[in-house]
Image (tube, grey):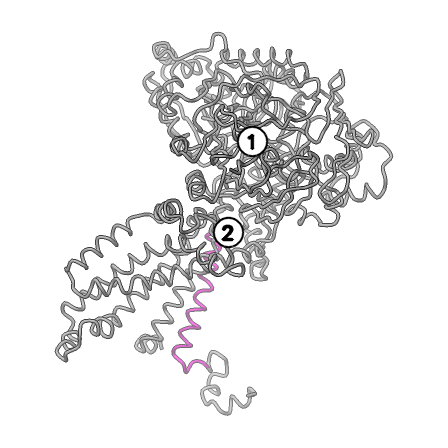
């Protein structure tokens, strides 16, 4: 069984297709955290377009404008165990809960690294089957109770057992005996779990996730999973709430006004509309947060978000993706635009399981007929980060070029189309303006090579139905994640038994279900498994290069430009994730609001 | 207190009919109201069924949507069961209908909260927007139409007609963005987004709803003004009672207000009634643009997340508002015009 982190949800998917922000900083991916992470987060000053911003200052109130279709949607609540939008609500979660780990810009500003935050360290065992997470000493929830190993176990069991799609999906070692546990603690846990939960399953999970001392929790796996740790900030395991507060408030109220140990405390929550928080004076980092108050305001779309910041009702627009608005914001002397580090390139997935793309020559013809450089120039002013594989410059294991990648060659495309006796293709995409523009450009290019193209622009629901039914020929997507094994990474797009993949089924299998039941795998599946199952970074780099090569050689999907949405920030506001880019874990970058500050002068 | 026996003694009609319907049969207006209300019931049932069928036909799988893109089939099926979507559609419709009659509108599949509770929170916002927009559109339309009709073909009339046609041609979401650009971004007089409840501050409440109300009311006002001006103008050109009034020495304002407008009010009433539905529907976009926590926004969020319980209830309520608005117009006809009352009798 493949291990996949399931932090991605449909809103993420929706946004992946929407993302079309201008530009990408040429950040070189760097990852050296496979053997564990240790240390602390620095209180580095932000910088504004490379200029020094001075010493951080205390005080002030900041309002962040979020898109109601993505980060501004917390309709499933803010309890990490039951929320389905943990990966989209990164800012809110970091503000309320802090987070055990954070993705931070590296000191040289040229990459990102996973660093412990409320955790002090994380250490993999040599066999990669045990991850030991040690907490910092003395952290308290905002209700005054300790954030200790028991609280973490309580949260993690809830996180993986409450039905949230924002949790991890790894192979826990369920054969281990659960330790002796306090009855009162067990009652508290079971009271916080769904009514229909299987007690035996929970007890076996308590064997796989154990507190070994007051500050250390171990996760035991039956097979290694390198993405578990790298994917942490985008999953509900990262955000620890107070068990005592849950017991006092009850599930519904805790979901509305959760209690964590983060830099801010919720003062008001109008679900999906506005979240207001004030400074936590007992935050574990003495000088932080800098802000006195933080608000999240949800608005409907980029245009409204931009007008809101112009009208002075907001200070930051997170994740602006409209190219024209980004350019306008860039010209506005009161605003600064900071582009993120992209991890998700456009990709045309070809369904190699059915006609016409079960013929490799048809897939090759699409490669040769596709000129993503021209699309990048024409539609995005050449500011996209061109990619030949499943990740981009902001992601781990990025390799800009794949040897032998089939680049635009109209003559060769025409020859191949003639050789196979013509090619009729349905190109699907979601009914969003940027996606439609790209598909129209692709249609024009492909038709020049003699390919007859029909565009099917449909709602997201239709596209998902098409994917799941397998009745599709080609679909324009964006694909990628900071760690390719996490979220909507390469496995989701190219694993043979995943519903959103067009890669061929394993030999001898007539369906994905049959392949899973009989344990059949393709060569690509084995490579994907191997890359996700080792914690050796060098080995993963080699394997992902091999995977890129395999996808390219088999012509499964031509890749295009990658974009990351922009952060639009009022002048005089600084901080990581705003003025210092942090690669997107899947779609949006996380703003570390505890270190965001406002120039008071 | 009058007993049934007393009533039977004192009312000869009740002896004849012996029922509530019979007792009220003597009032044509009441008979009309009862008949219209009774007709509204099957209409509402038909609407609820149609909405249910449309939602069933809507593309996408709510269970998969809820479970997430990379959920396993088992997870999706578990979510489907928890949402009740594994049951046959007719059974789900009947369950919803009986629940609705009991005031139980189901539970939002996204937030897990009772739909009735969500609607109760949001209905006041939408009612305030619609109510104010309704009043404002009529209040704006009347003087403008009278002013234009005062001298048909004159410069004021032409300017008003051109201006109103221009505003009418602008879709309400564009109008909303333009209003924000002018009054919030450029002049910084009014907030661009957000809603302040009246309990917090009446002034801030009015400031927060001004732009959305204007965005809803302006196109309606233009529509009403153009209609009213046309109707008034026609009467001024050749109606006998207008000529009579003129011959008796009545001034133009008196003629317009007392003679022509009275006659036009029936047509205006029809238009206003028909447009209540459009006004309510307009809140879906306007509330989204202005981040107003009303029913329109709730419905849009429900559509995006395929939250069927939310969408079903919101659409039903919107339809019910439209039906009852038209019912009200019918009743007003009867109140204003005895011919309709007695015609119905």
> Which chain contains the residue that carries disc 1?
A
For image coordinates 54% across by 27% down, the residue present is A580
Magenta: main secondary structure: helix
Q: Is residue A232 magenta?
A: no
Q: Is residue B49 shown left or right of residue A56? A: left
Q: In this view, does A523 lie above or below A272?
A: above
Q: Residue B196, position in %: x, y?
A: 50, 55
**Quarter-wise, where is residue A211 in the image?**
top right
Q: Is mark 1 on a helix, strand or loop?
A: loop
Asked whether residue A516 is in view, the answer is yes
Q: Which of A582 and B61 is in front in this view?
A: A582
For image coordinates 43% across by 46% down, the residue present is B289
Magenta region, residue range: B24-52
In the image as oriented, which residue stretches furthest toward the front? Answer: A601
For image coordinates 57% across by 32% down, the residue present is A591
Label 2, on which residue? Answer: B293
Label 1, on which residue? Answer: A575
> Which chain contains the residue that carries disc 2?
B
């Amino acid at each position: 069984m493949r291990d996949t982190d399931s932090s991605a949800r449909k809103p993420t998917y929706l946004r992946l297709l929407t993302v079309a922000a201008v530009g990408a900083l040429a950040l070189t991916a760097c990852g050296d955290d496979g053997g564990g992470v240790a240390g602390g987060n620095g209180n580095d000053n932000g910088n504004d377009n490379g200029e020094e911003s001075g010493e951080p200052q205390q005080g002030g109130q900041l309002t962040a404008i979020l898109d109601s279709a993505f980060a501004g949607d917390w309709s499933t609540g803010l309890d990490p165990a039951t929320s389905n939008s943990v990966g989209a609500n990164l800012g809110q979660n970091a503000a309320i809960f802090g987070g055990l780990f954070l993705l931070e810009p590296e000191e040289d500003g040229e990459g990102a690294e996973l660093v412990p935050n409320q955790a002090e360290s994380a250490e993999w065992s040599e066999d990669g089957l045990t991850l030991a997470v040690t907490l910092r000493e003395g952290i308290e929830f905002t209700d005054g109770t300790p954030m200790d190993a028991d609280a973490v176990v309580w949260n993690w069991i809830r996180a993986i057992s409450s039905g949230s799609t924002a949790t991890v999906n790894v192979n826990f070692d369920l054969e281990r005996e659960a330790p002796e546990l306090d009855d009162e603690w067990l009652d508290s846990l079971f009271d916080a779990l769904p009514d229909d939960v299987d007690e035996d399953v929970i007890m076996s999970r308590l064997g796989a996730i154990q507190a070994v001392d007051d500050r250390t929790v171990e996760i035991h796996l039956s097979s290694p999973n390198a993405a578990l740790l790298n994917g942490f900030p985008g999953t509900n395991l990262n955000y620890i709430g107070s068990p005592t507060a849950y017991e006092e408030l009850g599930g519904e109220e805790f979901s509305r006004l959760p209690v964590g140990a983060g830099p801010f405390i919720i003062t008001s929550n109008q679900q999906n509309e506005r979240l207001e928080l004030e400074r936590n004076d007992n935050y574990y980092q003495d000088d932080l947060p800098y802000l006195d108050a933080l608000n999240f305001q949800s608005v409907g779309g980029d245009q409204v978000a931009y007008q809101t910041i112009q009208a002075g009702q907001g200070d930051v627009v997170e994740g602006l993706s409209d190219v024209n608005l980004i350019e306008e914001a860039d010209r506005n002397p009161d605003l600064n635009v900071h582009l993120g580090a992209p991890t998700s390139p456009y990709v045309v997935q070809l369904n190699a399981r059915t006609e016409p793309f079960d013929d490799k020559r048809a897939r090759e013809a699409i490669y040769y007929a596709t000129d993503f450089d021209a699309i990048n120039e024409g539609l995005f002013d050449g500011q996209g980060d061109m990619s030949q594989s499943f990740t981009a410059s902001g992601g781990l294991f990025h390799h800009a070029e794949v040897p032998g990648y089939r680049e635009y060659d109209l003559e060769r495309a025409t020859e191949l189309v003639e050789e196979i006796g013509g090619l009729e293709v349905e190109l699907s995409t979601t009914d969003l303006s940027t996606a439609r523009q790209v598909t129209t450009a692709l249609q024009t290019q492909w038709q020049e090579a003699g390919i007859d193209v029909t565009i099917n622009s449909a709602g997201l629901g239709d596209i998902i139905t098409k994917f799941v039914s397998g009745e599709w020929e080609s679909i324009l997507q964006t694909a990628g994640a900071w760690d390719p094994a996490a979220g909507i990474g390469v496995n989701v797009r190219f694993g043979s038994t995943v519903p959103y993949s067009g890669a061929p089924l394993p030999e001898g299998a007539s369906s994905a279900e049959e392949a899973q039941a009989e344990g059949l795998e393709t060569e690509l599946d084995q490579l994907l498994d191997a890359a996700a199952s080792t914690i050796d970074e060098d080995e993963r780099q080699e394997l992902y290069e091999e995977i890129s090569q395999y996808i390219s050689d088999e012509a499964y999907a031509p890749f295009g430009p990658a974009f990351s949405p922009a952060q639009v920030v009022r002048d005089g506001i600084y901080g990581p994730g705003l003025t210092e880019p942090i690669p997107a874990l899947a779609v949006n970058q996380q703003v570390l609001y505890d270190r965001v500050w406002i120039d008071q002068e | 207190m009058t007993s049934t026996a007393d009533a039977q003694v004192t009312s000869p009609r009740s002896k004849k009919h012996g029922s509530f319907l019979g007792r009220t049969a003597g009032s044509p207006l009441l008979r009309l109201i009862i008949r219209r209300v009774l007709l509204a019931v099957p209409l509402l049932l038909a609407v609820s069924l149609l909405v249910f069928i449309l939602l069933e036909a809507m593309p996408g799988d709510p269970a998969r949507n809820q479970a997430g893109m990379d959920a396993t089939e088992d997870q999706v099926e578990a979510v489907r069961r928890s949402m009740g979507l594994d049951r046959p559609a007719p059974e789900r419709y009947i369950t919803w209908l009986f629940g609705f009659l009991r005031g139980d509108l189901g539970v939002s599949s996204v937030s897990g909260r009772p739909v009735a509770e969500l609607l109760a929170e949001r209905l006041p916002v939408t009612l305030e927007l619609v109510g104010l927009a309704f009043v404002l559109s009529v209040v704006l339309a009347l003087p403008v139409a009278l002013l234009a009709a005062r001298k048909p073909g004159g410069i004021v009339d032409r300017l008003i007609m051109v201006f109103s046609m221009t505003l009418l041609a602008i879709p309400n979401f564009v109008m909303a963005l333009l209003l924000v650009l002018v009054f919030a971004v450029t002049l910084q007089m009014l907030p661009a987004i957000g809603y302040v409840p009246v309990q917090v501050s009446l002034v801030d409440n009015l400031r927060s709803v001004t732009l959305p109300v204007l965005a809803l009311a302006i196109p309606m006002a233009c529509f009403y003004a153009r209609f009213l001006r046309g109707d008034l103008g026609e009467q001024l050109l050749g109606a006998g009672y207008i000529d009579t009034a003129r011959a008796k020495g009545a001034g133009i304002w008196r003629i317009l207000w007392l003679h022509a407008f009275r006659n036009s009010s029936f047509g205006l009433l029809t238009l206003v009634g028909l447009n209540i539905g459009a006004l309510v529907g307009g809140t879906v976009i306007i509330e989204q643009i202005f981040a107003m926590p009303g029913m329109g926004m709730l419905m849009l969020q429900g559509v995006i997340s395929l939250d069927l319980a939310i969408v079903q209830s919101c659409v039903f309520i919107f339809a019910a508002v439209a039906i009852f608005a038209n019912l009200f117009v019918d009743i007003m006809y009867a109140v204003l015009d005895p011919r309709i009352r007695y015609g119905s009798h």
